[in-house]
Each structure stands twice: as structure tokens, then as C-alpha cells.
Image (spheres, grey):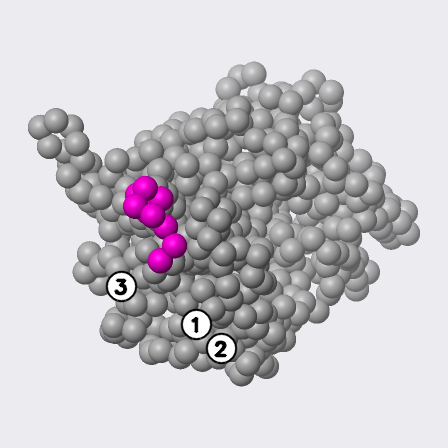
């Protein structure tokens, strides 16, 4: 019988690994467009801090002549995900852009996943080489693309989500700026040759005419040399940006051209996604909110609500007042001469408003389609691959299946490891179920214990005194949640103690027996060894998956991403830190779940029932915050502290962790008679998705 059990467990392990391998193969196929795109991980260190990125390169871009010169040049796009997110959170956009024939550089922002943190630990703009932190790596990515011979240096664009959108916008501000090409030539005439520039000259936008009128032959020759350099720099700037539910310092403003104040817009073709239920929106109750907002009308140079999915052309001003834009035609329609002319002059604008909220970009098809359509139009490049925007979904589905296989695999690994003689002393027998399913006291306790924490979550993540970078706070989001979880653990523990002395003690069961606390120090040590052994197996598997399967990961995308991804060196410390900080929560939760076995019910049904109950509170909170709140009105029902939007998407991670951890905990409880092995295993395993991919402190 024992042999059969071992054999069955080995089969489960083999099947789980097979599923994960299949998910990896699909990831390679989709990410490389089944071989037509070359993937390469690059790490650059402009100022001593590593910046990591995945390059998507059309295979045809790498063709060279006999002398090694590249035969073709392709437009390139920098992709930058949002705060606390790694490049995997926008690889849907990267994949579809690469299918459309673009070179794509999908970066990990500084301080995220494989990219190291910078010495200023934030996003400041000090006048130092590290001022690139204001663009969290996009400026360095741009500089790298400028070195690649197969990249068309006149067609480099950028896109990003949330903070990444701000980085993309700031990149355009720092490279393209607010001066037209003619503005720059007029300023050169004034600065270098002393030509007096009038307001009429600025409005006329014809520097060549002034040069011909005022310069002699030698001066004209120097003017043309300078003009060539200025034109090259202007055309090599990031003149095409597509911002996804975020923005940078891109608002139009008054600038001075040779001392003449004039109104100027950012010199870039500029598209925006503003989700119906996204940042500062009106939700489904007011789906046109963004079309009539002051911010949109300023960005689009309009004094009336604008049309969604429509191209507009900005018109240049010769005064300090803006000139209203001109409405052109359908964003997804044919490219007319007016659209082409506006794109060439970097004056195209558009806005689209898909349904969804701020974090929907990870899996939103309209987002992907709009990004591809935008760059195809502005960069005048189309490889004629059909625009469906759904290819990445296949990869994400298999990634989710692979993640589920990983979660199943973990329990099978536990069984395999515990079959070793070293762990034999951990085996034990739990007490018989003591809870009566008809007891109102029991169910009242469960309702309080399950619904109480979610009701406090939204405000509770703001209870932590500080998330400043330190050895005890390497990931701010995890710090906020772990501090809340410790307080919840104390509250639930108090509730369990009160229940025991008020009701359970009279049944003759000991406190340590009811809550599975009786365990030797030797077996507690072995429980730690067991958990660490499983962690090593997971970390090794994720590293292998990353390296063999196109830098992939295993993630379940449900509102937010529950992601198991290879760990960078500093993240091992973060896993250790937050394993310790989350241990009280998983310990008390294990006490709650395993003391809740109902009499007269099978162990399997008992386990599944309370796994569902364990995560039900967080599920209800997700429904309340996202579907009753954000989706309908653009605002959450339970207010969260400023700067804590990331904790909204962590609710999905918590929900999955609460469901799966209850199963792990119950299985180990039935095998060992103690809640301790399961609690330790859970805190170690779920430290990986808990830290996600961000770090704001590292001593490595």
C-alpha cells in the first residue's frame, strides 16, 4: 500500500512537471511568434545599477550582408510596466507589438525584479547621473536602442502603464521636448548669428527663409551644418508615445522661442488609454467622463468633449494662447493623407476609453489593439499581420494552468520529502473533529474571523508607522499588508482563546489539542527544514522555467496577478523577511482552519468547505471594491490610504493564498497532528507572490 502511495505521488509529480513544461513551450511559441521573433535578455549598467530587459527582435532584423552590416532597420518601442510590476505585467503589449514587426525593449524598472535599486531609493530628479530615476530606466533603454544597428533611429517610441506611463511621457519630454524643429532652428539663428526673431517669424515657422535673407555664404554654410545636427537630434527623439492610464509632465505650456513667448504642445504623436473605471474616472455610471475632463481637453487641445477612438491634429500657435485641434478620422480606419501629414509633424493625438479599471492592462485586449494600431500609424510601419490583440491570452491561460500545476506539485513534493526517514518523527494523529455544524457559536466565530479582516483591510494597510526603505521593509506593499496581518492575527487569536474558555473547554478538550499546538522543538526544526526544502525546489524550478522558456513565469491573472517568478538575488532576503512577518498570520489562520473540522463530515469535504470559507471574505471584498465600487462609479467602496493602490490588486493574491494555504495546512495537520508544519510551509511558499517583483531596499 505504501509503495502504491509513493508511486501515485510520483505520477502526480511527473504530470505536474509535464503540465509546467507544456506551459513553458506555449510561452516560448507565443512570445517568439513561433520562431519569427528572437528573444534576448539584456542587462545594461549605465551608472552602476543594472537595468534588465527582454528584447523582442524580428528575426529578419538580424540579417546582415557579407561585411556584417544590418540589411534592414526596424522601428523600436520601449515598454515599461507600472509601480511594483515587472516586465511580465506588460508583456501582452510587448508580444503583440513584436508580432506586428516592431523591435521591443520591455524593461524592469529600476528597483524591480532583475533591475537593481538606485542609490537614491526613489524617483527623484537630483542633478546627478542617477536623475534617470525620474524615468525609472526608460532613458537608459533609449540610449541602448540608439546603439543598435538594426533599429531605425528616427522611429523610437515608448509606452507604459501607470508609473510606467509617466516614465514614457517624461522620456518624450526629455528627448523631444516642447520646441518644434523650426523653433530650434530659429533659436539657433538668434543664438549663433544674432538674427533678431520677431513674433511673426515664430508664427511663420520658416527658419530657412530667414537664413537666406540675413546670412552670408560662410554663415549659411555653418547654418546648414548646424541645421543637419539639430534635425537629426529632433528626428531621433522619442516622438511617439502611448500612455496607458497614467501620464508624465506632458501638459502643454508657454515657452520662449528666441525671447518670444508662445504656446507649445509636447512634440510627439501622443495617444492615451483612460479606462472607464480607471484613475479619477466615472465608472459605468459615467462612461464618457474622461472624454470631457479638463485634463483630456487640455491634452487634446479642445474646448468641447472629444470623440473616443478618433485622430485629432494639433495646430501650432504663434501666440501665448492655444489653437484648437482639428478632428480627423477614425483611429482604426484607413490612414489618410491628413493623418500621415500630422504624424510626420508629431501632432497626432487620440484617446480611447476601454471598459476596465487601472490594473486591467495586464489582460485587456482593447489595450493591446490600441497600442499596436497607434504605433503602426504614427511610425508608418505595417507588416500586415492581422490586428487581433488576443495572441497573448493563449500564453496567459497556459501560464495559469502551469501555476495551478505548481500549487498541486508543492503538496506532492511535501509528501515525497516527508517520506524520508529524517522526517518520520513528524508524523502524528490529530484529535477527532469536535465542532458541531449546528452550533451557532461556531458559525458566529467563523463569520467574525473570516469577514473581520477583509472589512479592516482597506484602511488597515495604512496602519503601519513607516514603509521607509530598511532591513525590515524592503517591499512597501508587503510591509503594509504584513503589518495589518499581524494585527489581525492577534485579534483572531484573542477570539479563539475567548471561544475556547467560554465554550470548548467544557467539552473536555485541551487548548493545545484543539488547536494542534502540541509539537516538539525537534519537529518544529524539521518543519522549518521541510519548508525550506520545498522553497529550494520551487526557486530552482522557477529559475529553470525562466531560463529555458523565454524568461517566462507562472501566474494566475485574476483582477491582479498571483505570480511565481524566478527570484533575483536581493529578493531571497525579502522572502526570508516577509516569511517571518507573515508567520503570525498563517500560524493563527492554521489554528482557525484546523480547529474547524466538523463532526459527521468527510475529511475531504471538510477541507474543501473551509478552504472556500477561508478565502470567502477576501472574495467578497474583491467583488465589493471592484464590481460594486470601481466598475460602477470609478471609486472603491472602502477607501484606501493615498499611494496604496497596489494593495487593491494584492487582494487577489491573498484570496488565492487563503484558499490554497488552507488545503496545505489541513493536509499537513492530518498527517502530523499539528498546525505548525502547515503554517511554516505556507508562510515560506506564499512569500514569493507576496513580494511580487518590487524592492526599494537592498544591501546586496
Residue corresponding to mark 3: 387
In which quadrant is the N terminus drawn? top left
* Residue found at x 20% / y 41%: 61
Q: Secondary structure at mark 1?
A: loop
Q: Which label belongs to residue 324?
A: 2
- Front residue (pair 131, 104): 131
Q: Quadrant of residue 627?
A: bottom right
Residue corresponding to mark 1: 315
Q: Quadrant of residue 665?
A: top right
Image position, residue 221 (x, y; %): 30, 43
- Front residue (pair 456, 356): 356
* Residue found at x 34% / y 67%: 342
Q: Main secondary structure of the magenta part?
A: helix
Give the left or right position of residue 56, taking residue 669 as reference: left
Q: Is residue 76 above or below residue 613?
A: above
- In the image, the segment drawn in magenta is 213-221
Q: Is residue 216 magenta?
A: yes
Instruction: Say few, some or many: other residues with alpha carbon within 10 Å of mark 2 (under 14 / 14 to 19 / 20 or more).
Output: some
* Residue found at x 48% / y 49%: 194
Image position, residue 500 (x, y; %): 85, 47
Amino acid at each position: 500500500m505504501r509503495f502504491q502511495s509513493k508511486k501515485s505521488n510520483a505520477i502526480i509529480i511527473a504530470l505536474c512537471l509535464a503540465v509546467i513544461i507544456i506551459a513553458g513551450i506555449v510561452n516560448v511559441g507565443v512570445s517568439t511568434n513561433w520562431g519569427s521573433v528572437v528573444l534576448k535578455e539584456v542587462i545594461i549598467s549605465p551608472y552602476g545599477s543594472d537595468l534588465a530587459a527582454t528584447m523582442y527582435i524580428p528575426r529578419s532584423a538580424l540579417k546582415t550582408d557579407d561585411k556584417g552590416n544590418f540589411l534592414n532597420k526596424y522601428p523600436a518601442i520601449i515598454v515599461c510596466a507600472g509601480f511594483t510590476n515587472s516586465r511580465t505585467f506588460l508583456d501582452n503589449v510587448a508580444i503583440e507589438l513584436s508580432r506586428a514587426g516592431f523591435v521591443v525593449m520591455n524593461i524592469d524598472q529600476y528597483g524591480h525584479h532583475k533591475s537593481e535599486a538606485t542609490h537614491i531609493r526613489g524617483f527623484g530628479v537630483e542633478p546627478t547621473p542617477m536623475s534617470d530615476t525620474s524615468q525609472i530606466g526608460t532613458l537608459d533603454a533609449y540610449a541602448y536602442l540608439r546603439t543598435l544597428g538594426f533599429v531605425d533611429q528616427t522611429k523610437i517610441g515608448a509606452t507604459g502603464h501607470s508609473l510606467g506611463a509617466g516614465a514614457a511621457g517624461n522620456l518624450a519630454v526629455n528627448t523631444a521636448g516642447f520646441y518644434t524643429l523650426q523653433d530650434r532652428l530659429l533659436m539657433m539663428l538668434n543664438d549663433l548669428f544674432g538674427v533678431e526673431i520677431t513674433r511673426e517669424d515664430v508664427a511663420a515657422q520658416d527658419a530657412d527663409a530667414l537664413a537666406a535673407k540675413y546670412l552670408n555664404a560662410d554663415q549659411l554654410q555653418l547654418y546648414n551644418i548646424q541645421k543637419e545636427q539639430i534635425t537629426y537630434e529632433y528626428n531621433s527623439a522619442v516622438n511617439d508615445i502611448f500612455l496607458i492610464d497614467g501620464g508624465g509632465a506632458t501638459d502643454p505650456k508657454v515657452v520662449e522661442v528666441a525671447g518670444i513667448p508662445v504656446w507649445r504642445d509636447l512634440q510627439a504623436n501622443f495617444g492615451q488609454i483612460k479606462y472607464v473605471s480607471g484613475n479619477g474616472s466615472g465608472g459605468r455610471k459615467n462612461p464618457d467622463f474622461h472624454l470631457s475632463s479638463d485634463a483630456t481637453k487640455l491634452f487634446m487641445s479642445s474646448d468641447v468633449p472629444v470623440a473616443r477612438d478618433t485622430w485629432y491634429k494639433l495646430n501650432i500657435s504663434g501666440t501665448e494662447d492655444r489653437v484648437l485641434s482639428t478632428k480627423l478620422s477614425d483611429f482604426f480606419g484607413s490612414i489618410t493623407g491628413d493623418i500621415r501629414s500630422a504624424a510626420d509633424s508629431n501632432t497626432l493625438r487620440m484617446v480611447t476609453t476601454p471598459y476596465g479599471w487601472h490594473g486591467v492592462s495586464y489582460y485587456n485586449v482593447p489595450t493591446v489593439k490600441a497600442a499596436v494600431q497607434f504605433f503602426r500609424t504614427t511610425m508608418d510601419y505595417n507588416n500586415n499581420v492581422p490586428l487581433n490583440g488576443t495572441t497573448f491570452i493563449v500564453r496567459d491561460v497556459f501560464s495559469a494552468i502551469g501555476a495551478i500545476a505548481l500549487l498541486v506539485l508543492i503538496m506532492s513534493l511535501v509528501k515525497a520529502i516527508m517520506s524520508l526517514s529524517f522526517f518520520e518523527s513528524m508524523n502524528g494523529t490529530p484529535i477527532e473533529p469536535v465542532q458541531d455544524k449546528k452550533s451557532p457559536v461556531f458559525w458566529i466565530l467563523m463569520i467574525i474571523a473570516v469577514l473581520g479582516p477583509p472589512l479592516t483591510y482597506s484602511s488597515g494597510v495604512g496602519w503601519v508607522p513607516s514603509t521607509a526603505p530598511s532591513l525590515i521593509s524592503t517591499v512597501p506593499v508587503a510591509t503594509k499588508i504584513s503589518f495589518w496581518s499581524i494585527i489581525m492575527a492577534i485579534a483572531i487569536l484573542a477570539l479563539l482563546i475567548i471561544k475556547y474558555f467560554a465554550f470548548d473547554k467544557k467539552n473536555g478538550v485541551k487548548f493545545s489539542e484543539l488547536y494542534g499546538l502540541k509539537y516538539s522543538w525537534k519537529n518544529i526544526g524539521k518543519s522549518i527544514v521541510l519548508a525550506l526544502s520545498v522553497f529550494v525546489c520551487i526557486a530552482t524550478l522557477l529559475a529553470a522555467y525562466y531560463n529555458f522558456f523565454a524568461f517566462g513565469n507562472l501566474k494566475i491573472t485574476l483582477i491582479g496577478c498571483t505570480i511565481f517568478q524566478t527570484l533575483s538575488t536581493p529578493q531571497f532576503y525579502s522572502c526570508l523577511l516577509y516569511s517571518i512577518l507573515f508567520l503570525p498570520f498563517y500560524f493563527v489562520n492554521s489554528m482557525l482552519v484546523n480547529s474547524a473540522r466538523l463532526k459527521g463530515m468527510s475529511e475531504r469535504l471538510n477541507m474543501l468547505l473551509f478552504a472556500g470559507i477561508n478565502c470567502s471574505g477576501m472574495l467578497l471584498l474583491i467583488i465589493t471594491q471592484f464590481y460594486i465600487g470601481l466598475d460602477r462609479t470609478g471609486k472603491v467602496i472602502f477607501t484606501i490610504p493615498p499611494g496604496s493602490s497596489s494593495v487593491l490588486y494584492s487582494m487577489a493574491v491573498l484570496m488565492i493564498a487563503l484558499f490554497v494555504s488552507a488545503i496545505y495546512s489541513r493536509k499537513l495537520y492530518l498527517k502530523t497532528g499539528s498546525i505548525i508544519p502547515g503554517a511554516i510551509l505556507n508562510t515560506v511558499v506564499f512569500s514569493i507572490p507576496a513580494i511580487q517583483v518590487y524592492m526599494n531596499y537592498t544591501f546586496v
